[in-house]
Amino acid sequence: MKAIRKFTVRAVLPERLGALEALAGNLRWSWHEPTRRLFERIDPTVWRAVGNDPIALLGEVSRERLDELAADDGYVGWAEQLRDELTSYLEEPRWYQHLEGEKPARIAYFSPEFGIAATLPQYSGGLGILAGDHLKSASDLGIPLVAVGLFYKAGYFTQAISADGWQLESYPALDPDGLPLAVLRRPDRSPLQISIALPDGRALHARIWQAAVGRVRLLLLDTDIPENADDLRQITDRLYGGGGEHRLLQEILLGIGGVRAVLAWSELTRTEAPEVFHTNEGHAGFLGLERIAGLIGEGLSFPEALEVVRAGTVFTTHTPVPAGIDRFDAALITRYFSTDLLPGVQVDDVLALGAESYDGGTKDVFNMAVMGLRLAQRANGVSKLHGQVSRGMFSGLWPGFDPADVPIGSVTNGVHAPTWTNPRLLDLAERTFGTSDTTAVDWTSNELTDLDLWAVRNAMRADLVEDARRRTAKSWRSQNPTGPVPAWTGEVLDPDVLTIGFARRVPTYKRLTLMLHDRDRLRALLTHPDRPIQIVVAGKSHPADDEGKRLIQELVRFAAEPEIRGRLVFLPDYDIAMAQTLYPGTDVWLNNPLRPLEACGTSGMKAALNGVLNLSILDGWWDEFFDGENGWAIPSAEVTDPAERDRREAEAMYDLIEHEIAPRFYDRDHDSIPRSWMRSIRHTLRTLSPALSADRMVGEYVQALYVPAAAAEKALSADHFEGGRMLAAWRAKVDAAWPGVSVAHVESGGMTSVPQVGDELHLRAHIHLGGLTPGDVIVEAVYGRSGEGDELTDVQRLALEPVSGNGATPDAGKPTLFTGTVKLGRAGSFGYTVRVVPHNALMAASADLGLIATA
């Protein structure tokens, strides 16, 4: 018989084991290896069976075992020591507290998904894992961050593979009582809830789950409560589930409900309200509208509130393609925002923020990323190349500006080293260097022998082989529940063979099956008599993406061929737990997306932290970090025919594996150590471990984005928002006057008849200001090399100064003269132009208003 309902009963621990409850209740255990070992000691078999989940472990272990541990003074002392260390970790000053200068007292970080631990499956892929790593590093650095997301009752789907290779999805319901979560409650113990007005007089209510992620508090909104009608209870059913209206409701809840939740949490806990709001991708973009509504309630107009909100908002875009952005019918937005949802905010103002009102845009579409950019004074992509791609993709919002001037910067993603570095490597660092911080040691030091490092690499590969065999047998049993598990499942992979890993989501642009382009050649590589390779593959396709599922099926069917099934394995249900064994256990990490469609691609980063060498297209992070010693770059084929491009890039991949990678891996000395390979491993660990760390990433966010955003928000909010009112009035003035701004003409002189290096170019620019003052604008000489089509490259700028008494009064009706001198500092082609842009000290960038006048 089957139960009609399941729930989790938490264990009551012996009093002497009270420290375990505190340790299990904070998710720091998910990246703190000593705490994980403490729980594993309770019962290693049960620990593995429950997926390394302390709460589940304490619920499964016998009372007799708990009593036995409670009587063990050594174990009790160990637990209490770790609890005391956790208390110090939560309270002691860290990097952020020692950061000089003013800094925000609180930062709110919004994301639709968070990948923190396999036991809290609220993530689907890279975006969620990145968000989880952001929280962990923020905690380690002592950054006062509160995070906001949704609690999905079924999380993301569980993947199985049918006998014919087709992906099957299931959505097992999660019991929050069995997770490291607690309901946010008022002092009278009643649950704190937020409410949102919906069309037709309905209301949506949500309770708030909270999780302790080290020093960071994560708030997750949940609509599955009795106060909601049945259809509204399903809003937080699945991550990225449902159609357009369902998705819109999730994003309204995340953005608008999320702000209400974080402000209620702040008031309840008497902590500082956030000064900076970070929107991780466009899904949470409505948070800006909720903040605007709050400021309107304090007496500001919409334009004034918009300026204040923009100043304190950071927007991070993760997609390099328009198809990856959420877009809604404008009519649907009108329906939801023509209500009491946001008091004081008019629906036309909402629609204007998300309108694709630029060349190439689509009418009557509301674009969440466009709204996110318009609501944030600071925005960034997630690698240098992605920042460049984003500036081009969104350049329509800043017409007339060169893509390089579009105000979207970049902060290259990082990964949380303590989470993704294998315990074997942590132990090696501790034994050799006296610290488990693998990002802070010199892996090229003679203190570490090749023999010791190679032994650890071999052990991590053996761990992967063991895990792959177990998962392969489990997958076979799920497909054939009545038949015996064949012997070959216990022999897949070889712990001594060069192992290549490939694991990620499976949209078509990531090209899961590029490795199958020439199947005969791949077979030859897999079964080479002297230098064989083996490939471990994992990944999920979105449930609605049949083309992605077809790619998985194609690979699974090929891997089922008896000749190669021991050398090519697809592991179902890719998640954090699998990844933590998969990444370290490979020798080479393969990534072959269509360039430049990979925003960052952090799986290769996690592999590199474990000494794995990368084999990748020069896309995402690899484009800026490949140095010739840390792996191999697959050259991108610059051709327009997709089939020819795939052929060339696949051939280049095969050539690298056959002629460079495999020979180097199998080239051993008399001690059976591949010395040249070890040199690259050491180099990778020494150079990439600190650079790819999420600590580096989050530190950049603090110094380049959070601190300036907090200062800007403070400047506009001071004296009852006087700065915000002034900036809004100035913007309105400039918008009205700008049609009258132009470059009348430009004069030059001062050079010899044949310009030479060292000559000075004297410029006189006559500018119609349209009623503005010289202080409202910057007039710049823009100069550099003049290339094909007179395009300027290697651009530099010089601000020209207004000359008093030359029509400088705004109402003179005559051009104002601006002058300056450019020194010719290099030989070769040279070109220049003059441009005019608005200027205000409260703006973050000269392109902020999207206004420009050029010669």
Image: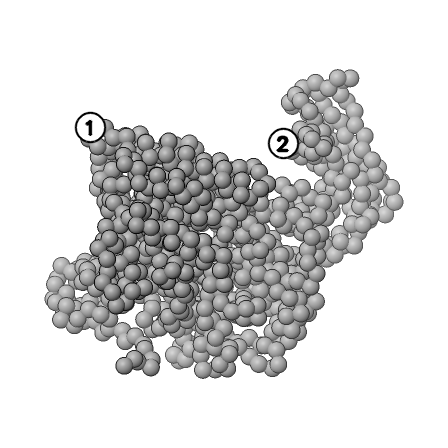
In this picture, is 142 found above or below 23?
above
Q: Quadrant of the C terminus?
A: top right
User: Which amino acid type is marked by label 2?
Assistant: Asp
* x, y percent for residue 253: 52, 70
User: Which amino acid type is marked by label 1?
Assistant: His
* x, y percent for residue 561: 33, 50
Quarter of the image where one finds residue 191: bottom left
**Left or right: 63 with respect to 758?**
left
In this picture, is 87 found above or below 532?
below
Q: Residue furthest right?
A: 813
* x, y percent for residue 181: 36, 69
* x, y percent for residue 63: 16, 72
Q: Which residue is mark 1?
A: 670
**Residue at the (33%, 80%) spot, across then down:** 5
**Residue at the (54%, 71%) spot, across then down:** 246
Image depth: mark 1 or mark 2 in front: 1
| Viewer-side residue, 710 vs 2 | 2
Q: CA distance from mark 1 to mark 2?
A: 52 Å
Q: Residues within 10 Å of mark 2 (few under 14, many from 20)?
A: few
Q: Which residue is mark 2?
A: 794
**Residue at the (30%, 75%) spot, across then down:** 8
**Residue at the (45%, 53%) spot, across then down:** 551
Which numbered disc flags the more N-terminal residue, 1 or 2?
1
Camera sees residue 567: yes
**Left or right: 379 with respect to 422?**
right
Q: Residues within 10 Å of mark 1 (few under 14, many from 20)?
A: few
Quarter of the image where one finds residue 807: top right
| Viewer-side residue, 855 vs 670 | 670
Q: Quadrant of the N terminus?
A: bottom left
Camera sees residue 432: no
- Tell me the element at label 1: loop
